[in-house]
């Protein structure tokens, strides 16, 4: 246990992945709740990010995931032009086994105790119905159902934003935003991925999919008979003639094992934290593969839940999400001008916005 604590403290206070303002360890023994809430930055406003419910192998992995995801949300919200900092929460456990109303209510009380510094929403393992329960104890909850004053499923606009990022990638690489006749591989066809498949098919793309859940694959194949499925992600990334690879499941999809065998010319997907470690972005660029930074292209969902705080309007949100096309193109241009990978260019732009906000706040004191 001492090693675990020391590892967490090192990450928080000394590593490049640290710099978080606040990390809260939450426990409610009556309901079985064990959770971590990480607030990376409130420079631009209250931290905003979803709640992941996942059966982590151990508590250290859960803390590490919360820290990485919260940091990513700071950059995502900055690049999306939102007046929100970055935060994330993880609930430890298998949602199929331990998720209960009592546990979600206890979690809502934990979030509420932060007094609005963190605004929560859905993520892997949590859904609109869950946020309706959390909201009964916490007014800083988004991603609720329309019946309860919310915007509903944010995966719709997440997928739309990723689609816009793909179009921008195609424009940059091939001089045409159209994805017609392009072969696109989608890894993960759950909440976001299956919506993305529909956008791609509507434009005339050829789609290849995979998912660890057979029911998710079956649903897509039944709805779209023209889609082809392969056994696993390893088979997908090696698919001959793949133009675009879209990681839409969990993070770490781009690593020392996968990058050398990628056949795609573009990587653009919905998953958070796709780069397994620093330096992978350079490996991708060295192979001549165009990487659309994940936290830029998957920002449609957070645009939606942020809008919910001010009276949700779907058309207004969709118009904001459509701007992901222009933002992605601007990142590619900055990367070219600075001679750096797109991921580094996006980081520079986001960090500049956060630094300017902090400087402005200091100036007002």
Image: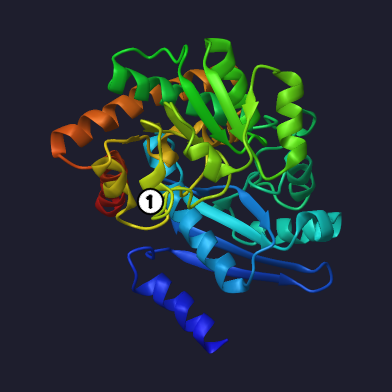
Q: Pick whichever, 151 or 268, lies toward us.
A: 268
Residue at the image point whose x is 59% and y is 65% from the top:
62
**Image position of 33 (left or right of 354):** right
Q: Pick whichever, 46 or 72, lies toward us.
A: 72
135 up-or-down from 226: above or below: below
Residue 316 percent across, percent down from the top left: 53, 19
Q: Pick whichever, 120 or 245, lies toward us.
A: 245
**Image position of 338 (left or right of 205):** left
318 up-or-down from 91: above or below: above
Question: What scheme was used to colour the molecule?
Answer: rainbow
Secondary structure under tag 1 reads: loop
312 up-or-down from 133: above or below: above
Query: Which quadrant of the structure image shows residue 91?
Result: bottom right
Residue at the image point whose x is 43% and y is 26% from the top:
241
Residue at the image point whose x is 71% and y is 26% from the top:
220
In this figure, which residue is indicated by the disc labeled 1?
Answer: 43
């Amino acid at each position: 246990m001492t090693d675990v604590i020391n590892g967490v403290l090192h990450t928080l206070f000394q590593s490049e992945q640290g710099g978080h303002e606040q990390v809260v360890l939450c426990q409610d023994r009556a309901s079985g709740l064990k959770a971590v809430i990480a607030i990376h930055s409130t420079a631009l406003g209250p931290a905003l990010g979803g709640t992941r419910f996942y059966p982590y192998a151990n508590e250290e992995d859960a803390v590490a995931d919360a820290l990485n995801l919260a940091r990513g949300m700071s950059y995502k919200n900055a690049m999306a032009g939102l007046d929100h900092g970055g935060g994330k929460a993880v609930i430890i456990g298998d949602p199929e086994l331990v998720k209960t109303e009592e546990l979600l209510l206890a979690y809502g009380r934990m979030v509420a105790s932060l007094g609005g510094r963190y605004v929560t929403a859905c993520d892997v393992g949590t859904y609109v119905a869950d946020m309706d329960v959390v909201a009964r104890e916490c007014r800083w909850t988004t991603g609720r159902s329309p019946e309860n004053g919310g915007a509903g499923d944010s995966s719709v606009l997440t997928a739309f934003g990723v689609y816009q990022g793909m179009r921008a990638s195609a424009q940059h690489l091939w001089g045409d935003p159209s994805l017609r006749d392009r072969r696109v591989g989608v890894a993960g066809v759950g909440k976001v991925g299956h919506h993305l498949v529909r956008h791609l098919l509507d434009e005339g793309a050829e789609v290849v999919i995979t998912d660890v859940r057979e029911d998710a694959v079956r649903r897509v194949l039944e709805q779209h008979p023209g889609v082809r499925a392969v056994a696993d992600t390893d088979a997908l990334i090696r698919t001959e003639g793949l133009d675009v690879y879209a990681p839409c499941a969990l993070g770490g999809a781009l690593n020392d094992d996968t990058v050398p065998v990628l056949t795609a010319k573009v990587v653009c997907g919905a998953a958070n934290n796709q780069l397994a470690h620093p330096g992978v972005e350079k490996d991708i660029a060295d192979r001549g593969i165009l990487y659309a930074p994940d936290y830029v292209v998957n920002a449609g969902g957070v645009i939606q839940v942020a809008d919910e705080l001010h009276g949700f309007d779907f058309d207004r949100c969709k118009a904001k999400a459509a701007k992901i096309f222009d933002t992605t193109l601007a990142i590619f241009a900055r990367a070219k001008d600075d001679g750096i990978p797109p991921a580094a260019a996006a980081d520079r732009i986001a960090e500049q916005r956060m630094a300017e906000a902090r400087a402005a706040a200091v100036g007002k004191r």
